[in-house]
Amino acid sequence: MLAAAATSLLPRGLFAQTGGGGASLGSGDVAVLNYAYALEQLEAAFYTRVTSSFYAGANATERSYLSDIHQHEVAHRSFLKGALGGSALPDLELDFSSVNFRDRQSVLTTASLLEDTGVAAYNGAGPMLRDPQNLMSAGRIVSVEARHAATLRDLLHPRSTAFAGDDQVDAFGLGSIMKPSAVLKTAGTFIRTPIDFSGLPKA
Amino acid sequence: MDFNILDFVSNLDKENASDSRRAFFQKMGEHGGKIALAAATPILASCAAIGTTVAPNRELAVTTLQFALLLEELEHAFYVRALATGSLIPSSDRAVFTQISKHEGAHVTFLTTGITGIGGKAEAAPDFDFTARGKYPGVFRSYRTFLEVSQMLEDTGVKAYKGQAPNLITSSPLLTAALRIHSVEARHAAEVRRLRGVKPWDGAFDQPASKEQVLASAGGFIKGKA
């Protein structure tokens, strides 16, 4: 139901949903891990582009951070692919045409958006998992994503409250959370491969 | 982003409580919408009086949240004291620590409310020794020492929530809340590390810590522990 609702809102209808013949996430914990794997594929590919030719004026700290983040996302992608084995999604076709990789603001704003979305997606997906070991694996990844998110925000808005801004942390001190339908709206801008999300369990 | 304390309690409620209470909360939700936590607290206190239970492992959930509360009380007291200590924190960094302190205070309130809401007892903060028995004598005189302790507390908090999360796997609302706090602690840790001039991370995968490991790191600050 969520998936069907999301389709109509996607700008390009990239996510074919139920019965659309898109790449299937599977069901149960496999579906949740594939959902994470899709996001990690997106992040890893993004930073591969970023670090293959840094934007103009990237200083040493920024290069170091972005290179580390690239390594982390590649490691997350490899880990999830290995954990999923034969159930892993195929390699997704991605589209970064909306990003200007030569421009600091464009790169860091996109990076920040991807990390914030990743954190909120993992926060929403964690409770869908049934196997405590999978929950632990997701937990070991999400806090690193949150570290990335805070760091990128601080690069954009140094020494302000942005690293854990009121747009990401609510009045109860709880970090943001997104349902898959909302995550797809954001990530869908960059993913061209149709994906069938109907097998994701409810939290 | 929008969090409704009534929804939270209502979800706990769905796991194991009477239809009448659920209807009560639904009705409150309809009329109250987003309400202030302060206003919700008496409602939650009444939950405890009714004897709310969280299936299927309430005792474990209570002790897990009580442990989280102790760490949040420690963090909050630490930042309140630091922010009140004259020129300890340079003006350039006060916005960061004011934000962190705000979150830790909100976590204390939230966990207190949550523990009470599932029928547990939320202990008031014990006495803390921020020198950790003399290990950090200048914690409120030297900004560098303060940052060192701050990073240790935040990194330990991240590890602690990660280690404790599986205890809450049977309660989706509690697990969701714990994961959401966990991600905020990780943001804090990254920022404090940046202010210290060290990398915001230790690699691609963060490690969990057991209760014993957490107390080995932070127990020195808690009088009567470790």
Image (cartoon, coloured by chain):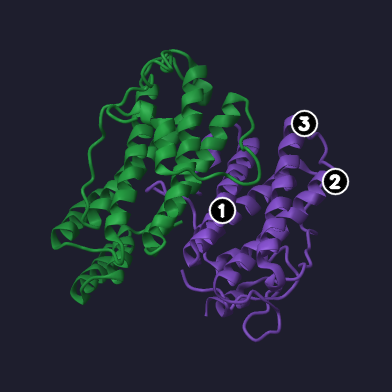
Chain colours: A purple, B green
Task: Report whether residue B134 is seen.
Answer: yes
Find the residue positioned furthest to the bottom.
Answer: A19
Q: Which residue is mark 3?
A: A59
Q: At numbered mark 3, what does the secondary structure look like: helix, strand or loop?
A: loop
Give the residue at x 32% y 29%. Answer: B222
Q: Which residue is mark 1?
A: A119
Q: Is residue B21 above or below residue A134?
A: below
Q: Position of residue A1 (x, y in %)?
A: 52, 80
Q: CA distance from mark 1 to mark 2?
A: 25 Å
Identified by mark 2, the residue type is: Ser
Q: Earlier in the sequence, mark 1 or mark 3?
A: 3
Give the residue at x 22% y 76%. Answer: B19
- Location of residue B9 (image quadrant): bottom left
Q: Earlier in the sequence, mark 1 or mark 2?
A: 2
Q: Nearer the viewer, residue A42 or B26?
A: A42
Asked if badge 1 and badge 2 are on a common chain, one would say yes
Q: Is residue B74 above or below residue A33?
A: above
Identified by mark 1, the residue type is: Val
Residues at badges 3 and 2 in contact (C-beta under 8 Å)? Answer: no
Task: Report whether residue B95 is seen.
Answer: no
Q: Earlier in the sequence, mark 3 or mark 2?
A: 2
Q: Which residue is mark 2?
A: A52
Residues at badges 1 and 2 in contact (C-beta under 8 Å)? Answer: no
Q: Position of residue A51 (x, y in %)?
A: 81, 44
- Is B210 left, or right, of A36 in this rendering? left
Q: At numbered mark 2, what does the secondary structure look like: helix, strand or loop?
A: helix
Give the residue at x 25% y 58%. Answer: B118
- Location of residue A137 (image quadrant): bottom right
Q: Which mark is residue B28?
A: none
Q: Position of residue A133 (x, y in %)?
A: 53, 59
